[in-house]
């Protein structure tokens, strides 16, 4: 059969003629990849898996206003999980890890861009179809890999929860300011009540009874005293309303503070980050096997290309 025939049999014969070259390149690729793996630092990957709870379960209205059975999804909806993914993929998280663990010094990288790229390359977060979140971190130190994975999860949870807690804080602050303003108004009303009592000489009643102030008073009443009692009635009604408002505000403040100060967790941890005892990188067997296959295909390609080139040149010369 002519060398110009490039059917399957011709290709096999041509590769067989150069078998020493093919075997040599293949073995060289395998040996070099093995040596490369030996020179690499072992990398250890720690992984944590968690599910996001439905934030509505920690809402004040759900906790304090839930008077009847309401079916609520225990786990977060897709939008909440997307928020978690956004926080988990943010640059702020990477810089937080760099700062918290002084990773520039640990990895010996001073240039911020390179350091950021290295840390981000070691970090991975994925959201599965079942809404569970998998977070991994790879590091030469297995204990540090576990610590960073835990810190990354804690950062995401804190950032997600802070949205609700900061809102509670803002509402609480507004309610306290309003209650303080009403308290000042009540103090002014108290001064007015004291002045009216002193003017009409009425100290027999702690407060006039609403709707019965004048009618229930025995004996003759002067016009000034009657007008004073009417004023007391109006002012004390306003004061009572203010007092009820303050009580309602204080109740609300208490509810918001309960949600803000409690150790609330919005992540249900399925698998906590662990200290890995087996290196995840380099994957020597996979790398060597892939290199051997790559060397085999590459050497076969060179042999066939060389044979094809020779056949073309021989054809031109003929």
Image (cartoon, rainbow, N blue to C red):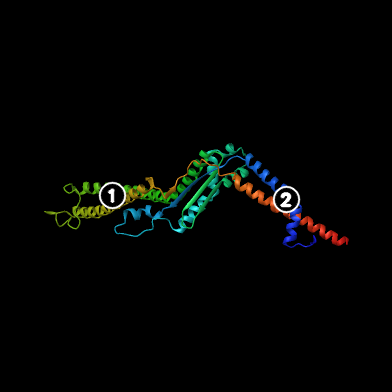
Q: To which quarter of the image does residue 115 belong?
A: top right
Task: Give the residue at mark 1.
Answer: 189
Q: Is residue 85 left or right of residue 187?
A: right
Q: Viewer-proximal residue, 144 or 234?
A: 144
Q: Viewer-proximal residue, 242 or 103?
A: 103
Residue 39 appears at what percent x and percent y? 64, 39
> In this picture, is 101 found above or below 304?
above
Residue 294 appears at what percent x and percent y? 67, 51
Q: Is residue 100 visible?
A: no
Kindly state the secondary structure of the residue where label 1 is placed. helix
Q: Is residue 28 left or right of residue 103?
A: right
Task: Give the residue at mark 2.
Answer: 22
Q: To which quarter of the image does residue 316 belong?
A: bottom right
Mark toward the start of the polypeptide (2 vs 1): 2
Q: Quadrant of the C terminus?
A: bottom right
Residue 38 appears at what percent x and percent y? 63, 40
């Amino acid at each position: 059969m002519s060398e110009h025939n490039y059917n399957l049999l011709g290709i096999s014969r041509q590769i067989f003629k150069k078998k020493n070259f093919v075997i040599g390149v293949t073995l060289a690729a395998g040996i070099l990849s093995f040596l490369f793996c030996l020179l690499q630092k072992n990398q250890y990957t720690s992984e944590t898996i968690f599910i996001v709870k439905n934030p509505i379960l920690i809402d004040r209205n759900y906790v304090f206003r839930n008077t009847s059975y309401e079916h609520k999804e225990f786990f977060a909806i897709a939008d909440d999980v997307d928020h978690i993914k956004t926080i988990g993929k943010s640059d702020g998280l990477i810089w937080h890890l760099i700062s918290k663990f002084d990773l520039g010094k640990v990895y010996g990288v001073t240039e911020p861009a390179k350091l950021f790229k290295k840390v981000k390359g070691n970090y991975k977060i994925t959201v599965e179809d079942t809404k569970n979140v998998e977070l991994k971190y790879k590091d030469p130190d297995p204990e540090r890999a576990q610590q960073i994975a835990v810190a990354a999860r804690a950062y995401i949870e804190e950032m997600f929860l802070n949205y609700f807690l900061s809102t509670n804080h803002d509402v609480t602050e507004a309610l306290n300011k309003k209650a303080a303003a009403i308290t000042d108004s009540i103090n002014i009303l108290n001064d007015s009540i004291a002045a009216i009592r002193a003017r009409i000489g009425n100290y027999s009643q702690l407060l006039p009874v609403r709707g019965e102030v004048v009618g229930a008073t025995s004996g003759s009443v002067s016009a000034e005293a009657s007008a004073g009692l009417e004023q007391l009635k109006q002012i004390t009604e306003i004061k009572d309303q203010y007092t009820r408002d303050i009580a309602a505000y204080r109740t609300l403040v208490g509810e918001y503070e309960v949600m803000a100060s409690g150790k609330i967790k919005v992540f249900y941890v399925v698998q906590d980050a662990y200290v890995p005892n087996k290196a995840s990188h380099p994957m020597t067997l996979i790398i060597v096997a892939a290199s051997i296959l790559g060397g085999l295909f590459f050497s076969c390609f060179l042999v066939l290309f060389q044979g094809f080139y020779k056949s073309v040149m021989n054809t031109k010369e003929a």
